[in-house]
Structure formats: structure tokens, C-alpha cells
Image (tube, rainbow, N blue to C red):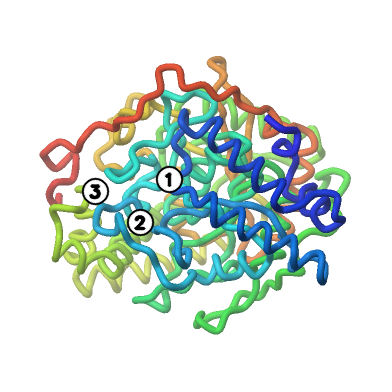
Amino acid sequence: MTDLLEKSATELVALLASGALSSRELTQAHLDRIEEVDGAINAVATVDAEGALGRAAEADRRFAASGPAGPLHGLPMTHKDTHRVAGMRSTSGSPVFADHVPERDDLLIARLRAAGVVATGKNNVPEFGAGSHTFNPVFGTTTNPYATTLSAGGSSGGVAAAVAARIQPLGEGSDMGGSLRIPASFCNVFGFRPSLGVVPMPAERNAWAWLGRTGPMARTVRDLELFLRSVAGPAEELQLQAPLEASAFGGPAPDDLRGVRVAISRDFGLGIPVEPDMLEALDRAAAVLESLGATVEEACIDLAEADRVFGNTRALDFASGLGSLVDTVPELIKPEVIWNVRKGWALDAREIIETTAAATRLQERVRAFFSGHDLLLTPGAQVVPFDAALRYPERVAGVESETYLDWMRSACVLSATGLPTLAMPAGFNGAGLPTGVQLTAFHYRDAQLLRWARVYEAATGYAQRAPEVSDHGRIVETAPALAGPHHHADVE
């Protein structure tokens, strides 16, 4: 592996902007790395090598004529396959769209392109991004660079695996129920779910949608900030604009965390089951924060209504976005998606109104909690990376999962709050598997959250431990869904 690929995006764009490195040279190294390791992890679903090298050459020509085109000038990047890239196959992991080539970019991709990114391909995702384990019938299963028989998480699992495997230093993902945070925890990288609208994510059928977010993944917090300086900011497509400009991100981090009030919760106040290795990781992270001067005490937001808010809002979003497909070609849609869509169709007006009221009460509890705390520290996932042949873990810490979302509750209940949340590496368990934690701040304190996280990162350096990618014994086939309500063939 070339030393270039160990560098951060911040370091690489500085080299590109100085003329010490060409985009074509970097893009070729990126493509060579895909060739070298992707057979073991299946992170990159589509590669456009010829087009990428052409785009890199054009970036070099523009640089020679007028300097860097933007803050990410010349940086190669594969994109999440749920995001449309003009002229590049964009499948969402679904047989329905296996040959789909969109004519226009999604807004986020357009902003990355304008910032100077060289698009090189697409990252693998679960079908329609549903679930936090990356497998689909079009491209198969993405596995973990640190243990290639295990899951990389999802739905941004392909992005996380690519960043961890040193294919690229920076990537974009999306997160409704943990799709940035769980794969970050599984793959020893940072994944950031920002506040609403910070990275604009227009929804075609619901201009008021709030649950899903887009955000970055990287091996350094500074790279997350670089991404946000490149793409954050108002968008005319949004009904509500975020009160944060791109320029808010970055700046000096404090020397320590003295005066920062951190609450820690092992089970989110709900008895959510978490495996012992993940609780040990939580304790490690808490000890680091305390050593840096933070005050750490056990406390949590009152999340008693978070499951209801998340479950019903997600179901409505699925019904809105995918309902017509489920009605038209259900035989081509995986059962977990059908279950979510039918749950959305089944919600009556009373339940929708009550869900809105519950979400309002939840925000009152969020405000009360953050009047006495600056941060909430929680497990990054309920489990360590699991067997990639499974559809999802059916038991967590001895507790049986009733739905495919139950093992993701550690992320889902925080999604229901809408708060900015950063997944951070938290070291490795005894078997050498990555672990992670979540750090949550109040609405639109995203920039401060990342500056505090830089202090933690400097004290740990966990993400700098690279995997030794091997395809020995790699699992590529995930089990088919079984009939019955436990596997969501029908609405429960």
C-alpha cells in the first residue's frame, strides 16, 4: 500500500493544492487499492476507472490553468449507492434499479463535485439502505476489513469499509437509524450524523422529512470538518434552513475538556441490551474523557417515548418513499422493507397525531437534559461485528430480537431526538475487533461537538490502527429471509 493512502484527506488536499501531488496520481493509487483489497471486502459495488482517470486529468488541467477548483480539489471518492451520481449506475442495492443510470446528481453529490471531488464509483449498501448490515441481491455482502467473515455494518457499510481499508480517506453516508454510526463503530472510523439541515438532504415526496440525515465518514475528525466546510450550508430545496454555515466547522480545539459536563448511559435508561465488549469500550472512552478533565456522571435523556417516535416516523418515511414499489413489485423487495412500508400504511390518523405529540414531549426532555449537561456518551452499537452470513443478530446479550431493528436501538433512540451524534472509535476487544461509542450534543452544537472530539482523538489515536485485509474464509452469501413474522414476511 502506498504511503499516500495512509494520509488524511486534509493532508492530501494540501498536497494537491500545492502542486506536489496530481489528482491523476492519487486517483490511480486509489484505484490500485480497490483492485488490491476489494475482493476481500466487497465495499465498492461499481468502479468507473476510465471515467475517474479522465476526471482526474481534467482536474489537473484546471489546476494548471487556474489553481484548485475547490476545497476537495482532485480528491478521489466512491459514493454511497443510495446517492444518485449522474452518468454512473446507482442501484440502491435493489434488483428494481440494477441498471439504473441517473441523469442528474443528488444535491450532496453535486456539492461534492463542485468542491472538486473526483467520482470513482459507488459503495455497496443494504437494499434501499434498510438495516445496518450491508448485503443485497445485486452485489452481495460487504465485510469488515478487520475480520472479513464479519459484518461491516450498514447502511453506509461500503463507505465505512472503504475508509477503514485505506481505499479512500473520506466518504459520504446517510443515517436514519444508525447507518453512519454503526458501521463507523464496526470499522474503527468516525461517522457523523449532523443536526437537521446542516448537510441538506431534500426528500422528493416529503419536504418536511426530518429523521434521515447525510454526513461524513473519515479516519480523523479534521476530515469530517473539511467535508462539512465543503458541503454544508443553506439550500433552496429545504423548507427550514439550518442556523449553521459551513464556515462554522474547524478552528482551534481546546487543550483539554475541563468544564465539559458529560453524562454517560449504558442502556439509554431503557434497559437496551448491550454486549459486555461494548460496555467495556464505553468505560474506556469515559476514562479518557475524565483524564482530559471532563466531569462524567451517569445520566440520560428521558427516552421513554423514543421508540414510538422513531418506529412510526421511519414507517411513514418508508411508506412515502417506497410504498409505490412495494405495491407494484413486492416480489423484488426484501421482506424487511415490505414490513416497514406496510407498518407505515397501517398507521391511522390518531396514531400519527399521538406520535407527533410524543415527539414534542421528547424535545422538551431533550432541552431539560442539556440544561445540565454538554454531552451524552453512549455505546456505539449493541454488539461487536457479527457473522456476515446472518441477516441481523437475532439475540443481543441474551435478549431475543423481535424485529430486524431491535439490535439497532442504541442508534435509533438517538435518531428520534434529532440531535447531532458522532460515532468515535473506542479501541479493540480481546479478539481484535473494533468497538465504538456515540457522543451526542444539543441541536446545532455540531461544530463544538467536533472540536471536543478532536481532543479525545488526540488522546487515543484508535483510528490510526490499520487493518490487515485478508480474504481468508470471507463470507459473501447472507442467509435468505425465512417465512414468518419474526423475519417480517408479514405485518405483525
* Residue type highlighted by circle 2: Thr
Query: Where on the picture, by quarter, is residue 252?
Result: bottom right
The reply to whether discs 3 and 1 touch (Cβ–Cβ < 8 Å) is no
The span from disc 3 to disc 1 (Cα, nearest Å) is 22 Å
Residue 91's disc number: 2
Which is more N-terminal, label 1 or label 3? 1
Name the residue beneath numbered marker 1.
45
Quarter occupied by residue 295: top right
Front-most of 57 and 474?
57
Q: Residues within 10 Å of mark 2 (few under 14, many from 20)?
A: many
Residue type (three-letter) at the residue carrying disc 3:
Glu
Q: Earlier in the sequence, mark 3 or mark 2?
A: 2
Q: Is residue 303 above or below residue 484?
A: below
Residue at image position (59%, 34%) is 165
Distance (Cα) linking label 3 and label 2: 18 Å
Q: Position of residue 226 (x, y in %)?
A: 73, 57
Q: Which residue is mark 3?
A: 336
Residue at coordinates 61% horizontally, 53% vertically from top-left? Answer: 53
Q: Nearer the viewer, residue 211 or 285?
A: 211
Say if residue 275 shows up in the picture.
yes
Mark 1 touching mark 2, by CB under 8 A?
yes
Residue 260, disc: none
Question: From the viewer's perspective, is 404 left or right of 230?
Answer: left
The residue that appears at 55% across and 67% down in the rendered structure is 108
